[in-house]
Amino acid sequence: MKKHKDHSDKNESEPDLHKNTRDPISLDKSKELTNYFRREAKKFISPEDFIDTGTLTDKNRYFHELSLTDPIHRALSEQGYRNPTPIQIKVIPVALQGKDILATAQTGSGKTAAFALPIIQRIEARKTRGRSFPRALIVSPTRELASQIGENIKKYAWYTRVRQVTVYGGVSKIPQTRQLKKGKDIIVATPGRLHDLITEGVVELDRIETLVLDEADRMLDMGFIDSILELILMIPDTSQIMLFSATMPQQIVDLANKVLVKPAIISADPPASPVDSIASSVFFVEQDDKFSLLSHIITTEGIKKALVFMKTKHSADRLVKKLRKDRIRSDAIHGDKAQHLREKTLKNFKSGDIPVLVATDVAALGIDVNNITHIINFDMPAEAEMYIHRIGRTGRVGKKGIAYNFCAERERHYLVGIEQLIGQHLKRAENYPFMSQIPVPEKTDLSEKRK
């Protein structure tokens, strides 16, 4: 629940939820606040509460029907945008009204434009002469994702007076601080760097009108719950909050109960549903044979652009060395690489110079690349929800995609979790080399909901 506005009956044992402060909240204080929110929050959201926003999908099939202004239309047209995606159709009209939003949207669904376009339009409508101050804050889990969001906002706002800055760790604070001191309307940030800049007094949130939490499920998985609650307490009571998540675990429901006020609950796809445009299949292969199968598939199928997921940074680097020995152009992206090397690798992957990109889950959050034809789960995701994040990199905006899942015997329980989450069986590949000699398991009982 957001901060209460009635101060009259404030209990002395309750934390002060009204004071906006730049002082960081201690761990003990954060736990106290979390417990307070848990006690006071009235449960008004459950995973079954997701609604379709009615006739919006049928009626608003073009951007000009979404009440966007001419400068934004012009920018969208120049970027090749023609028809809004389902999440844009549903979110934009509601966001323009300033309502809180809880939305499920898979990667590649167009959610950045869904929240960014209303923010730009609302700021532009009230922008006056003089120095700008932050009126919108967008928080994302990784620097790659933050960078991508910032680049898109710059394009969308090209013909407006709205200006943004992107701040993230791994690089010097000095250029980011200079940009902030010039005055920016929108801040796109990762939690760690944002906390540093707030603590140093560089960023003030007392005029924030809109807060967006993007990839919220991943931020919670990465341990940012305390940082998120701290941000909620720093922004004005009247701020609009939009929470976007690819999956809807109970953690997200609990967070929404704490921070949203009468939100519009929007789902472009049912929570945890696989993308219909992605053909996903499972290969039962033991760990020692996975590389041989991968090399065989890449060379025989003539794959043009594949994203391969690994469990660890070191295994990603080792796989790239093996692929290069087989004369397969590839590179790895993960947190141990310097930012400029990560950007160079991603640029080469986008251009097609590198047809195979090997990534860890955290680094892949910022990968926004069109026309990825294949997702290959070299290591099965231990968390079923991560499967949705991974395969969402292909099959975007009506295009077809392929997902291959390499499942060793010790990973078969992960497959069970995935199939129970998505409510369907993955197709079992047939007639492929390096097939496991261990008998194929029985199909998952989908009647049992994953715990």
Image: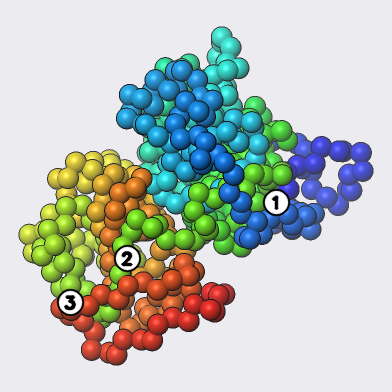
Residue 308 in the image, given as x and y percentages of width and height? 27, 60
**Amino acid under label 2?**
Ser
Q: How is the image coloured?
A: rainbow
Extreme residue in the right direction:
9
Distance CA(mark 3)–CA(mark 1): 49 Å
- Above/below status of 11 relative to 293: above
Label 1, residues with CA under 10 Å away: few <14, some 14-19, many ≥20:
many
In the structure shown, which secondary structural element does the residue marked by tag 1 occupy?
Answer: helix
Q: In the rendering, which numbered label is found on residue 86?
A: none
Distance CA(mark 1)–CA(mark 2): 36 Å
Q: Which residue is mark 2?
A: 280
In the structure shown, which secondary structural element does the residue marked by tag 3 occupy?
Answer: loop
Q: Which residue is mark 1?
A: 258
Distance CA(mark 2)–CA(mark 3): 15 Å
Residue 214 in the image, given as x and y percentages of width and height? 51, 45
- Residue at the (32%, 72%) spot, across then down: 427
172 or 289, which lies in front?
A: 289
Residue 195: tell me if it is visible. no
Of the numbered discs 2 and 3, the one sitting upstream in the chain is 2
